[in-house]
Image (cartoon, helix red, strand yellow):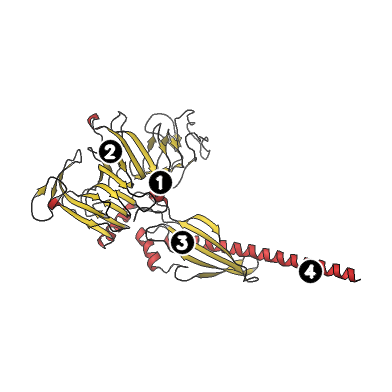
Amino acid sequence: MSVTAIILVSMLQYISAQLRFTGNRIEREKAFQIAEAGVYFYRWYLAHEISGKTAQQIKDFWENGNPYGVADAYEAEYSDPEGGPIGKYSIDVQAPDPNSTIIIIKSTGWTYNSPGVKRIVQARFRRPSWSEYAVLADDNMRFGAGTQIYGKIHSNYGIRFDGVAHNIVSSSLYSYDDPDHSGDLEFGVHTHVSPVDPINPTYPNDPPTRTDVFEAGRQMPLSTISFNGVLSDLNFMKSEAQAGRGKYFNDLGYGRRIILKSDGTYDVCTVNAYSSSSKVISSYRRNSGGGTCGSCSGQCLSNYPIVNNGVIFVEDNIWLEGTVNNARITVVAADLIGGPQADAYIGINSILYTNFDGKDILGVIGQKNVSVVRNSQNILTIDAALLAQSGRVGRDYYSHSYDKDTITVNGSIATKLRYGFAYTDGTGYDNRILNFDNNLLYYPPPYFPTGTEYYIDLWDEL
């Protein structure tokens, strides 16, 4: 009887321990699911609060809208649809830095049965920026043989790609009639590299897998990205520059030449005259009184400190060059007071970063075009995110006398119209290299256009 009692007691203790262990595991799993529900609740909350709003309105929401979980933890009860309330989640939010599109959500969940058993889920939310595309376009695009692009590519129209894409290539069209040649309909993203894609594709059939061209695949149709909506962003940038979060320049003369300097300042000269064909500046205005200068120097030059994470807004054209060092800045050429649309000109000299770890970020926005001038450097490097709101990023057609060797863009390109630095007759830049800057993924240039919805970018349990 003693031996039997000992065995029975041991068995009961073991069974009891297993039941407690199982119950604990169940409560831990419930706590985890409650914590995860808190993350998805916050995504729903943001979608209802800021979806479709302008950059100014989103900024106001984070600064003045008392968003849940920022000043104090936000708690809510979680209910089982069949069993009623079973626990709670508590949400703590790290609001986005003014210069980033990222927010951090930490959600802690627990059940009423075991309030001491808590699970914590942390998620990173991100608003996609236009600068996260190596190329973003609102026109039919063609990438020739030999082209290699490492960032994402998207067009609201069709894309012919005959090079190698190391990231996703997407279109808002499932099929289209490529204007570069006659024939039948083709996939919105297609290639003429042998074997050529089938013609007249039928939705929703997937295109053939072509990892030799599209290493990360192709997607279509996706939602369009509105270039017209950038106008509200331009107005916001202007108001921010006028408010001291940067520098505002009026429409005096024909624009400004801006030379970024590695000492954290920039030189500015007012353009008095330039060639409408070559875009070459011929004279500058003096800062006071009458008279002009033949070079950007002396009485025609002013120097200003770069406002980090700010915007330089010129109510006219800009000619931009120089070196960025430990600064994040956006330079805008836009006439919002009724004059001709403004252009951003690049190429008198290269635009270079000093650091490639995210400390240096430059955005260049042209209300119409972002153009490389005729007398650009033979070997030209542009370290920046480029955006042409109603025109194109590229270089005008010049005769063979002005052919150039190599242009390299280390950043991203967003263009309303088809971009290009060369032409089919061999004029322009012989070599075109597009390198996507990964730092632009999480730290777009200040005030650069972004999406208005947050997506879960990274998920982890703490």
**Disc number for residue 13:** 4
Residue, disc 3:
46
Mark 2 or 4 closer to N-term? 4
Mark 1 or 2 closer to N-term? 1
Q: Distance of mark 2 from mark 3, alpha carbons?
A: 41 Å
**Element type at marker 3?**
helix
Residue, disc 1:
133
The kind of residue on which mark 1 rests is: Tyr
Whether 75 is drawn above or below 423: the answer is below
Mark 3 or 4 closer to N-term? 4
10 Å crowding of disc 3: few (<14), some (14-19), many (20+): some
Q: Distance of mark 3 from mark 1, alpha carbons?
A: 24 Å
Left/right placement of residue 194 relative to residue 273 reads: right
Based on the displayed image, in which of its 4 quarters is residue 178 positioned?
top left
Q: Residue furthest left?
A: 290
Quadrant, the C terminus: bottom right
Number of the front mark, 2 or 3: 2
Find out whether the residues at labels 3 and 1 contact each other: C-beta distance under 8 Å.
no
Mark 4 or 1 closer to N-term? 4
**Element type at marker 2?**
strand
The kind of residue on which mark 4 rests is: Gln
Q: Distance of mark 3 from mark 4, alpha carbons?
A: 50 Å
- x and y percent of residue 38 in the render? 54, 64
Mark 2 or 3 closer to N-term? 3
Q: Distance of mark 2 from mark 4, alpha carbons?
A: 82 Å
Q: Nearer the viewer, residue 390 or 319?
A: 319
Let me know if residue 109 appears in the view: yes
Q: Nearer the viewer, residue 299 or 228?
A: 299
Number of the front mark, 4 or 1: 4
The kind of residue on which mark 2 rests is: Arg
